Image (cartoon, grey):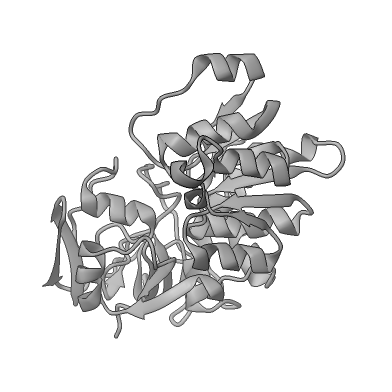
Amino acid sequence: MKALVFPEPWKVELIEVPIPKCGPNDVLAKMVSVGICGSDVGIFEGDHWIVAHEPGGHGHETGAIAVEVGRNVEGIEEGDHLARMGQGYAEYSSSVNVIGHGKDEKSGALPIVRNDMSMDEISFADAVGCAINCFERAELDRIEGKAKAVVFGLGPIGLILTQILLNNGIEVAASEPFHHKRSIAKKWGAEVFDPNAFTRATHGNYSVVNEIKKEFGEADAVFEMVGLNETLLDAIEIVQSGFRVVVFGAQKIQYIPYVNCRKKGVELVYPEAMVNSKLDKDYWDEALDMIASGKLDLESLITKRITLEEAVDAFKYYNREEWIKIIVEPQN
């Protein structure tokens, strides 16, 4: 079978390897839809805490079909649609992505069968689970009256989070430099702002934070989904005193302004990926149920579909400006 391998930073290779053997306790799955996650790009660039060398790489955003089921496995049959498969950048896999992102797999864990969902829908489960985790860690249910939230960064998880907030009756403002991402959030009902519209030449020191405060007001929760220190500082400035900044954007080192945080009593919260470490729960089933309900517009997030061969250049020349979600189709 064909598979991608990530031997060192900034290098990805398409290779041929044997199809995994399906043992008595295993499930062999055919990979159909695999979303490229920002963490996969980070692995390729070498600045992520996960290092992926083996065939199939990381590739946790998968929608797969069972093609062989071990004799000791119960509840899964050939042809079942499977969530929670891992090592997706390959034609076939027997690896399970239990909770992903560097956690040890639970002994005996199996894929989740969801025959009510398409392969594309299943591939979004990980991103939706991350967005649910961010939403719940903000604890907006403690707000009396109409809650307000600001989202910095409308990548796939930021956009999904925006939908979840709006679906829960929360007013949302979003800051995002790229027009096509802003237009999607605006279509759903969010107020959108372009941080690049406020330059020194035209606005002096008046920034997007000033504009959001003026037009939208301070927020009961701010979500930093970019991974830049500048937007973290903006988030701290715009959140109401005593409330939460949820930091999901990935960066290795952050500068946190102690005086600003201390004077405002800001709470900084760092969610794991699909795991709520505060409640010791993961969101696989909840994410899949939310997708199956049809309450999320995920189709608008798919920029294009590519083959494993095309994925080599997609990683090398990843276009954060124009792309939202790229779906790799290993069988094509």
Q: Residue at x 38, y 42 (%)?
A: 103
Residue 174, position as x, y percentages in the image: 60, 52
Taking the view exactly as shown, the residue that stands out farthest to the front is 201
Q: In front: 122, or 47?
A: 47
Q: In front: 68, or 279?
A: 279
Q: Is residue 28 left or right of residue 211?
A: left
Give the tally of numbered discs: 0
Quarter of the image with the N terminus is bottom left
166 over 50 or under it: above or below: below
Quarter of the image with the C terminus is bottom left
Q: Quadrant of residue 68?
A: bottom left
Q: Residue at x 56, y 71 (%)?
A: 298
Q: Is residue 70 left or right of residue 122?
A: left
The answer to whether residue 65 is visible is: no
Q: In front: 209, or 314?
A: 209
The answer to whether residue 230 is visible is: yes
Residue 156, position as x, y percentages in the image: 49, 60
Taking the view exactly as shown, the residue that stands out farthest to the bottom is 332
Q: In which quarter of the image is residue 285?
A: bottom right
Residue 55, position as x, y percentages in the image: 19, 63
Q: Residue at x 25, y 43 (%)?
A: 47
Q: Which residue is drawn at 47% across and 55% down?
A: 177
Residue 293, position as x, y percentages in the image: 69, 70
